[in-house]
Image: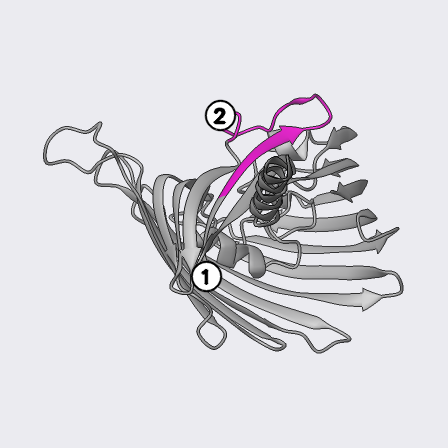
Amino acid sequence: MKRSIAIAALSLSSALSVHAQSSVTIYGLLEQSVGKYTGLSSINPTLNLNLLGSPGIWTLKSSTSSRLGFRGTEDLGGGSKAFFLIEHRLAPDTGATQFGQTGFFGGQSFVGLGGTWGDVRLGHMFVPGHIIATLGDPYGLDYNIAGGYGFVKGGSIVSYGGNAIDYRTPNLGGLVVEAQVALGEGGAAAGSIQPNRNVGVSLNYTEGKVYIGAAYNDLRTGTANQNRFTIVNGSYDLGVVKPFLAFGVARNTSLEDSKSYLIGLTAPIGAGRLKALYGNLDPAGANNTTKKFGIGYEYFLSKRTSLHADVATATTGSLSRAKGAEGGIKHVF
């Protein structure tokens, strides 16, 4: 009897030990805004109007990409771990899958191994340049009407790599290098370029208050045309204000270069944060430069819930000036 109790206790102890070394987390973000803009779509030339709404009409919309995700890790011992992440993007105003997402877990879905040597990820994930671009925008590439989406990657909209193999180095004195190859997996005639074959690399340096990032990404389609971008950005946290500066060059399928730059800042004020930016985008092959100014304030009701109000104005070439405003609620869990 005593032996049976001892074995049961040992089994329970082992089970608890395994459980303590593994974890699965459910996380998410829900955000909804009410907004309206007037004029043409020069508020954000690269953002689909399904995310902005219709001109002159009050719209319930997402300013931040709402999501539901699951992530987990398992300690393999010796400093190694296994991990996974799957994420669904949704439109809370309709309950439907977010516009542009392919597949239910089209946000990200990958599995990987990590250790003191860095980590390897396999699956569907952000290209390295998209992560760097997010860090170069005071709004983090949100769909906010005042945000800098389109002004940090030269106007490129490439964000994800499917069928991807990704490697990240460990932190090397503040520097992290990431390289990714998204396999084309055939689908093209012999001798031609495989469709959706993507190659990307990034350098991310963070030391104290200083951040500097650089990235290159090249998406090959089923023809000789390319969709590539190169970006460099940085920020410096002065405490009372954090300035941002970003430059981007993108080559589209017509093999012409678009150029962009963004100057922005965030500043803690009271129980919230001020965000402001000026963006300039020169599209390839056209005399229709877009210039945009956006400003907003996010007030934190708690660590997880905030309110925001934002306004923006922009012009594109000789088109009429566009203006917009929105306000919303964001909850993170």
Please state which of the two labelled residues, at mark 1 or mark 2, is closer to the viewer. Answer: 1
- The residue where tag 2 is placed is 103
**Separation of disc 1 and disc 2 at Cα?**
34 Å
Q: Is residue 325 left or right of residue 24?
A: right
- The residue where tag 1 is placed is 79
Question: Crowdedness of circle 1 by 10 Å Cα count: few (<14), some, many (20+)?
Answer: few
Judged from the image, the secondary structure of the residue bearing numbered disc 1 is loop
For the N terminus, which image quadrant? top right
Q: Is residue 88 magenta?
A: yes
* 212 or 85: nearer the viewer: 85
Judged from the image, the secondary structure of the residue bearing numbered disc 2 is loop
**Which dot marks residue 52?**
none
Question: Residues in magenta?
Answer: 84-105
Is 50 placed above or below 144 here? above
Q: Is residue 326 visible?
A: no
Q: Is residue 182 magenta?
A: no
Residue at image coords 14%, 28%: 189
Give how far across and how far down residue 265 sits, in percent. 69, 66
Q: Is residue 302 left or right of residue 254?
A: right
Residue that protrudes farthest toward the front in the picture: 1
Under mark 2, the amino acid is: Gly
* 40 or 214: nearer the viewer: 214
Give how far across and how far down residue 147 sits, in percent. 65, 51
The quadrant in which residue 54 appears is: top right
For the C terminus, which image quadrant? top right
Give how far across and how far down residue 7 sits, in percent. 57, 40
